[in-house]
Image (tube, rainbow, N blue to C red):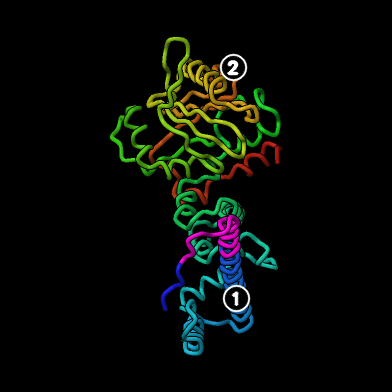
Amino acid sequence: MSPSPRPSRLPAGYAPLLADLKTRVRSAQLRAALSVNREMIQLYWDVGRSILAARRQERWGTGVVEQLSRDLVAEFPEVRGFSVSNLKYMAAFAEAWPATPIGQQPVGQLPWGHNILLLTKLRESGLREWYARKALEHGWSRSILELQIETRLHEREGKALTNFSRTLPPGQSDLAQRLLKDPYTFEFLTIEEPARERALELGLMDHVQKLVMEMGKGFAFVGRQVPFQVGEREFRVDLLFYNFLLRCFLVVDLKARPFEPEFAGKLNFYLSAVDAQMRQKDDAPTIGLLLTRGRDRLVVEYALRNLSSPLGVAEWATTAPARLPEKLREVLPTTEHFNSVRGEG
């Protein structure tokens, strides 16, 4: 049956009505998808708890789970997810998250594939909880969650050297500090070493979406080599972003060599230009970020000490920071151990 012909003239209120109905339908579809996912996660958690309880009471061997898989698949052939490996994941899931109700926890609202990733990639419950909350907050896909785990975001977030505590109001300062990281990891780049700043900039432009993802929550890309006329001279900033959480511009200056004090002075000049020519009355002060190939912490602190503009310094790398082998990390004393010995715990 062919669709009815479209009227030649539609009422003035038709377009907003159609837009509103489209929004309602999409919202309902999203709620339905989330509801189905929550029900599935709840089922998998219940199955996992039952398997754990039976193992403790009946002292099951591995063959029992294999038989359980065959029987469930035979009874519910239309239902996917009852493979032997998935049943084992369900048991591991219930063991990792014993508290109830599971649906009110971040993992209870994430897709099953995300939960398998958390189980297989992370051993510490605290880290699983941290990444689960981040994945839910940012809406990460499974591949992005895996990338953030592999590049150890939890060790990098909020670690940039800044003067924010002195140059921004307390609430703005804390949020800005959390949004910056050190180092920034551009694993998607394929540039030769030693990298030049031009090659770095062009490489990032080839992967703008991944660059914005690495920048973090609330960042929107404005442009590269953005020009500013100051007096009779033209100046250009390498990368310009806007953050909707901070409600301010972020100027990024890229360097392919270690930090030098004069870098801070130049970036401070760029912030003044952006504030004067682009900042609106409701915007917060523009923030600067120097991305360098290395930095001496004390030199950075001295360079930022007397600057009045909010500025941060972080390193960039094309690979994640080196990590100790698993077996070695298991036998080395932890930070908590050192603190307890020193009486700081």
User: Can you name the residue that lies furthest to the front here?
Assistant: 8
Residue placed under numbered mark 2 in the picture? 307
Per the picture, the main secondary structure of the magenta-coloured stretch is helix
Q: Position of residue 220 (x, y in %)?
A: 51, 39
> Quadrant location of residue 42?
bottom right
* Residue at screen point 59% across, 20% down: 309
Mark 1 closeness class: few <14, some 14–19, many ≥20 residues within 10 Å = few
In what element is the residue under mark 1? helix
* Residue at screen point 49% across, 88% down: 71
Give the residue type at disc 2: Leu
Quarter of the figure with the N terminus: bottom left
> Quadrant location of residue 243?
top right
Q: Position of residue 242 (x, y in %)?
A: 54, 35
Give the residue type at disc 1: Leu
Residue placed under numbered mark 1 in the picture? 43
Between residues 247 and 200, which one lies in front from this camera angle? 247
Residue 7 among magenta residues: yes
The segment highlighted magenta reads: 6-25
* Residue at screen point 31% across, 29% down: 194
Between residues 343 and 110, which one lies in front from this camera angle? 110
* Residue at screen point 55% across, 18% down: 272
Quarter of the figure with the C terminus: top right
Between residues 9 and 250, which one lies in front from this camera angle? 9
Quick check: 98 above or below 263?
below
**Of label 1 and label 2, which has the lower sequence position?**
1
Q: Position of residue 60 (x, y in %)?
A: 55, 82
In what element is the residue under mark 2? loop
